[in-house]
Image (cartoon, helix red, strand yellow):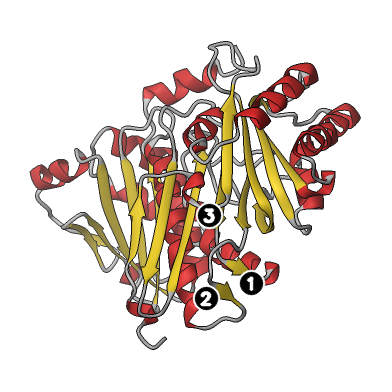
Amino acid sequence: MNTINKIDIKTMEEGITAVPGIKAAGVHCGLKKNGNEDLALIFSKKPAAAAGVFTTNKFKAPPLVVTEQHIGNPIHAIVINSGVANACTGDRGAEDAQSMAKFTAEKLGVDKKEVLVASTGVIGRFLPMEKIFSGVEKAVGELSPEGGEKAARAIMTTDTVLKECACRVNDKKNNISFTVAGMAKGSGMICPDMATMLAFMATDVKIERTLLQKALTKAVARSFNLITIDGDTSTNDMVVLFANGVADVEITEEGPLWEIFNRALLQVCRDLAYKIVADGEGATKVIKLTVKGVSDYHTGRKLALAILNSALVKTAFFGEDANWGRIITAMGYTDTKFYPERVDVFLGSVQVTASGKGLPFDEFQAKKILRQKEIPVLVDLHMGPEEVTALGCDLSYDYVKINSAYRT
């Protein structure tokens, strides 16, 4: 396996059912007034090892708590509803989340502890359980290897596009063939640890749960936890990964095969993360910010997110104004240690700051760069070997319109 690190990983616009052994369904059960799908079910006939990363918000929704309790078991399914978050709903909300797992398990013929639960939508409302039960029954009947797209549609709230991705690794020489695929939702209230986002992924690799969790934690750190739309973190957010072991590929240690799996998983996570930012509520541009020359990942991440979460930075990008002063100001109010006199800033190919001082630059060229749908920004601290790339978006009038009437 000396050539394993040279293996190409092919990314495709497919969904979670690209993984052999995974079926899915998306149905309408009456939670969304527009009649769109609002309940999703993902099922693995073969019990899967599962890993998860969850919100750090202190208000954890009951579905998330159930999933945290169950995820250490071999898992067969996850049931997800959109439209109602079942968050801040007290004892009744906790009972409803347990009932979702129990009813789904009964219909699938598995144990309740082998079912995970997720919800997304308006906070503070109770789930209409009769509608949920009806939806689960319908979804179980519609489970299919072609059901990934409907499932991805069913988890959407203010999203305007489906978010799906799949990666395939095929290397006959080394007898390696496996798939990683997933789906996500998220458009607003997005900021790391985690965001108002759900992501569900699967792989047919056989891997022990501890190694799977380590791989997911690493991938999330370099993808979902490096995106921001508005600086808000919600109550229901999770990333869950199933490994059902259907493929003839087994990972038992952190060797070359482990590294190729990590690459494929990161590719899927980054693709889904990018789609979330590009679909940001009211967003017109994606800001791809690289903080270079930092001493470590955490320093780079903190600086990147301070810049991308600044309302003044975001509005400058919306207005296509090369106001680099807002970028360095956002850096300056963090508690990270760096040397202002070393900082260089580039907007695309245009350098606007050198050694902490402004430069004369071509405003017309800068404007051309700021008109792009994706704007590359580089901040170089000249302090260390680490490089961190984070994604954000601009702040438009439409963001305020969308969020001023979310409940109504």
View extreme (bottom): residue: 2
Disc 2 target residue: 258
Q: Nearer the viewer, residue 254 or 247?
A: 247
Nearer the camera: disc 2 or disc 3: 2
View extreme (right): residue: 91
Q: Can residue 337 be seen?
A: no
Disc 1 target residue: 211
Question: Which structural element holds mark 3?
Answer: helix
Question: Which structural element holds mark 1?
Answer: helix
Disc 1 packing (10 Å; few <14; some 14–19; many ≥20): some
Residue 225 has which mark? 3
Residue 7 picture location, percent across and down = 34, 74
Nearer the camera: disc 1 or disc 3: 1
Residue 28 has which mark? none
Distance CA(mark 1)–CA(mark 3): 20 Å
The mark that comes first in sequence, 2 or 3, is: 3
